Image (spheres, coloured by chain):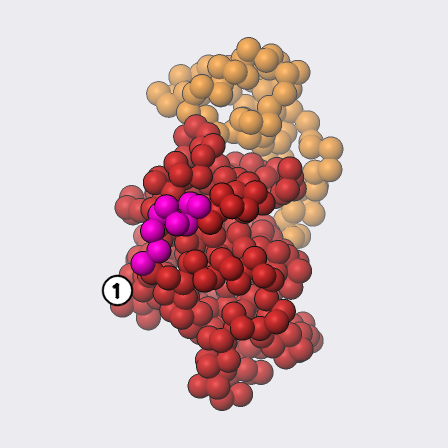
Amino acid sequence: MDPKLLRAQIERIDTLPTIPSVLKKLLAVIENPKVSLTEVGNFIQSDPVLTSRVLKMVNSPIYGFPGRISAVQQALILLGLNVVRGLLLGVSVFEVMQKSMVGLWEHSLGCAIAARIIAKKKNISEPEEISIAGLLHDIGKVVMILRYKEEYEEVIKEAETKDLLIIEAEKSIFDITHADSGSWIAKRWNFPQSLVEIIEYHHKPSLSRSLPMQTAIVHLADLLTRSVGFGFSGDNHVPAVNPAAWELLNLSDADLRDIFDEMDDAFSEAEAFLIGDES
Amino acid sequence: MRRVSIGDLQAGMVVAKPITNEAGMVMLSEGAALTDSLIRRLGSMEIGHVFVEGDAPDAKSRDERLADLEMRFRKTGQEKYMDTIKKVLKARIEEVYK
Ligand SMILES: [Fe+2]
Ligand SMILES: [Fe+2]
């Protein structure tokens, strides 16, 4: 398929009739880069389901804030506008994610958690932004499933029968990957350039120019989440780590053990939080 | 022996590995039975998890978990640095069942 045409179609995805109306309303708010914290806060609070989801996420092991955050405004101030916009997108696509690829939501949450843990280990400032990049790294899969349902089912079948990675099957059927479509849509929705870049290169982290460390972190977080078998990314085996990214992160065996320990703890907390979603 | 997050501890569980504080001092030794007040005190310390006796009710066996790991790494386990990641994961599984 022609990448230019694909890009144009994907960028108009919010006009699709199959997009849930909550997501449409939300996109109108989050794609405006000049939206104020108050406006976002009012929007969230106008919807009780959204309010409860946002508070759940903020209090989940994705962030690891001490104490309990019980007010939306407090969450907004703690996280900042860009992180909240990403979080909103994450919680709004979660239903689509759960329906389109069973386990993709868990995979995304797992990656968000792992990314925060690795970022903390590497003393990176603003680990919340990396968590959000982890949460949204595979958004391109959702976008492709929404826009090209049948073709994407073919991708999944092709990956299964030929024992390929999803990303390889995407390339063979679409000529583009979910990293491309994800970065296009993030850019189209006016997300920060840093998020666009991390999504674009999460499978080729050594190509990231301005954020090599952050991109390497999300790349590794994706891989470590798969390597412990948490969630389902569409692949039944773990892809190889990018050697340059691994060298850049420079983690010792002991570091890696610590990271897995923390992931274990956070994942068991997250599991409780995944099960009781709407309570 | 199994690894339990601090939030999932229950009174009556038996400590399977000494619990140490940040300074390395043993706070509770092997064989100690947990009580509600001990769990509360552990909760106020910088401890993420504790090893306790027994298997979780639906826990996979050591061999099942090792087989799952092999399956996940079947195509890339030999690649550069993947052997390190796999080795660390394998050691963690073996440690739990020792
Ligand atoms: Fe991906
Ligand atoms: Fe992924």
Name the spot of residue A60 as percent of width and height, x first: 50, 39
**Can you identify the residue that label 1 sits on?**
A210
Residue placed most toward the observer, B28 or A146: A146
Kindly indicate the quadrant of the structure image that contains residue A183: bottom left
Q: Residue lying furthest right in this view?
A: B57
> Is B80 rendered above or below residue A171?
above
Q: Is residue A59 above or below residue A126?
A: above
Q: Is residue A245 left or right of residue A1?
A: left
* Residue A106 seen from this side: yes
Numbered range of the magenta stretch? A34-42
Chain depicted in orange: B
Query: How many numbered discs, if any?
Result: 1
User: What x and y, as percent, mark residue B42?
Assistant: 49, 18
Examine the residues drawn in magenta and state their main secondary structure: helix
* Residue A265 placement (x, y as % from top left): 52, 36
Image spot of residue A226 (x, y percent): 55, 55
- Which chain is the one coloured red? A
Residue A263 visible (yes or no): no
Element at badge 1?
A: loop
**Residue A248 belongs to magenta span:** no
Looking at this view, is A149 or A42 the one in front?
Answer: A42
Quadrant of the frame with the C terminus of chain A? top right
Residue for point 31% across, 64% down: A193
